[in-house]
């Protein structure tokens, strides 16, 4: 660090509520963010391009509900989301 007040490389403003979890996949190319305060409040950020994936989650997918926990599989082929209805969704 060269400065006492470094500038962020990217501001992610796609979640409008408190971020409860931040998780990198094993290759550090995807960053998953979630908030339990709002339904379908989960976002994926592609780190090499610093862009939020616009099509995840699908806007009208009622099964997502409020995401309470999440994790990537060891090889990053899957993302599991646990919701407030006791379901685990695998993507």
Image (cartoon, rainbow, N blue to C red):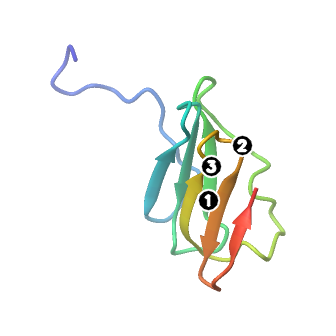
10 Å crowding of disc 2: few (<14), some (14-19), many (20+): few
**Mark toward the viewer: 3 or 1:** 3
Q: CA gap, disc 3 to disc 1?
A: 17 Å
Residue nearest the observer in this picture, 28 or 9 = 28
Which residue is found at the position 47% from the left and 38% from the top? 11
Is 69 left or right of 51, judged from the image as shown?
left
The answer to whether the residues at label 3 and label 2 have Cβ atoms under 8 Å apart is yes
Q: Residue at 61%, 59% (x, y): give it.
A: 42
Dot label at residue 9: none
Mark 2 lies on a secondary structure that is loop
Assess whether mark 1 and mark 3 are in contact (beta carbons under 8 angstroms): no
User: On residue 77, which mark appears?
Assistant: 2
Q: Is residue 19 visible?
A: no
Most extreme residue toward the front, as rendered? 74
Count neighbours of disc 3 (C-alpha within 10 A) and say few if under 14, some if 14 to 19, many if 20 or more: few
Residue at the far right: name it. 60
Q: Is residue 56 in view?
A: yes
Can you name the residue that lies furthest to the left here?
4
Which is nearer the N-term, disc 1 or disc 2? 1
Where is residue 20? Give x, y as percent. Answer: 43, 63
Image-quadrant location for residue 38: bottom right
Q: Are marks 1 and 2 in contact (CB under 8 Å)?
A: no
Q: Identify the disc placed on residue 42.
A: 1
* Circle 3 SS class: loop
Position above or below: 61 against 91: below
* Mark 1 burial class by Cα count in 10 Å: few <14, some 14-19, many 20+: many
Disc 3 marks which residue?
Answer: 73
Point 67% across, 68% down: residue: 40
Local secondary structure at mark 1: strand
Task: Relative to 30, say whether 22 is above or below.
Answer: below
Which quadrant would residue 88 be assigned to in this image?
bottom right
Q: CA distance from mark 1 to mark 2?
A: 17 Å
């Amino acid at each position: 660090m060269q400065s006492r007040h470094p500038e962020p490389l990217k501001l992610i403003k796609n979640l409008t509520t408190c971020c409860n979890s931040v998780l990198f996949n094993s290759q550090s190319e995807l960053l998953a963010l979630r908030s339990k305060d709002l339904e379908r409040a989960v976002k994926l950020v592609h780190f090499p391009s610093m862009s939020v994936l616009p099509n995840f989650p699908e806007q009208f997918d009622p099964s997502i509900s409020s995401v309470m926990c999440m994790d990537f599989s060891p090889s990053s082929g899957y993302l599991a989301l646990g919701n407030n209805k006791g379901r685990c969704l695998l993507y």
